[in-house]
Image (cartoon, grey):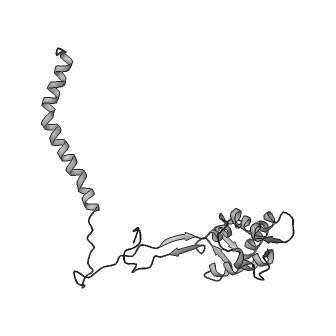
Amino acid sequence: MPPNRFTSAIRRGFALASPTLVLASAMLAIGLSCPAAAQNDNRVPVPLGSKKNAPVSIAAPPILVVEPVAMMIAAFDTDGDGRVTRDEMRKGVAKSFDAIDTGHTGKLGYIAFSDWAQKWLGDPNALPGAYETDSDSDNQITLAELQAKFDQIFSRLDKDKDGVLTRAELLTIRAFPMGDGGKRGKRGG
């Protein structure tokens, strides 16, 4: 193909830009590799007064968790004040029980309780479980047994013992134990 004005301009542009292009590419590569190198820095700061080669353990920060039962209790805040009283909780538990006890027998078998847990706690295996709730071990859970279990849970969550659960009290702080030998997050072995 014979050269024309278009192909000649392209060749001239590449010829002039070639050293500039190479230099720009090299600078871009160096600039992009520096943050990546900094991220792979495995050095750990040594606390003052300690030996340089002493192992230093860095604990993972604690995380906030909401138990499924706490989410359910939070939903029973009928007046929207961000607080749940024991009375609000008991009314909500009764309503949830009645929604599953469609035959109005006053009892839920373990399968029906599993359906209740799926609907109200989000998972059929969420706690409280059927066995711990069935206090008389008759393989059926009554509203009274469910209310008693929720009263226990309410008392456990009510940290300041004022008879009201706030959103902060419904959160659980989970911390990973230190001294796990760095095994967390590694597969195998």
Q: Give the percent coordinates (x, y) of residue 7.
A: 19, 20
The quarter of the displayed image where residue 105 is located: bottom right
Residue 6 against residue 13 in the figure, above or below: above
The residue at 65%/73% (across/down) is 127
Q: Is residue 15 visible?
A: yes
Residue 78 against residue 31 in the figure, above or below: below
Q: Give the percent coordinates (x, y) of residue 178.
A: 41, 80
Q: Is residue 78 visible?
A: no
The quarter of the displayed image where residue 1 is located: top left
Residue 101 left/right relative to 89: right
Q: Nearer the viewer, residue 147 or 103?
A: 103
Q: Nearer the viewer, residue 88 or 138?
A: 138
Residue 38 left/right relative to 77: left
The quarter of the displayed image where residue 56 is located: bottom left
Residue 33 against residue 46 in the figure, above or below: above
Residue 132 left/right relative to 175: right
Give the number of callouts.
0
The residue at 60%/73% (across/down) is 170
The residue at 78%/66% (across/down) is 95
Q: Give the percent coordinates (x, y) of residue 33.
A: 24, 53
The residue at 75%/80% (across/down) is 148
Q: Work out which quarter of the rendered image holds the C terminus and state it.
A: bottom left
Q: In this view, which residue lies farthest toward the front?
A: 189
Residue 109 against residue 151 in the figure, above or below: above
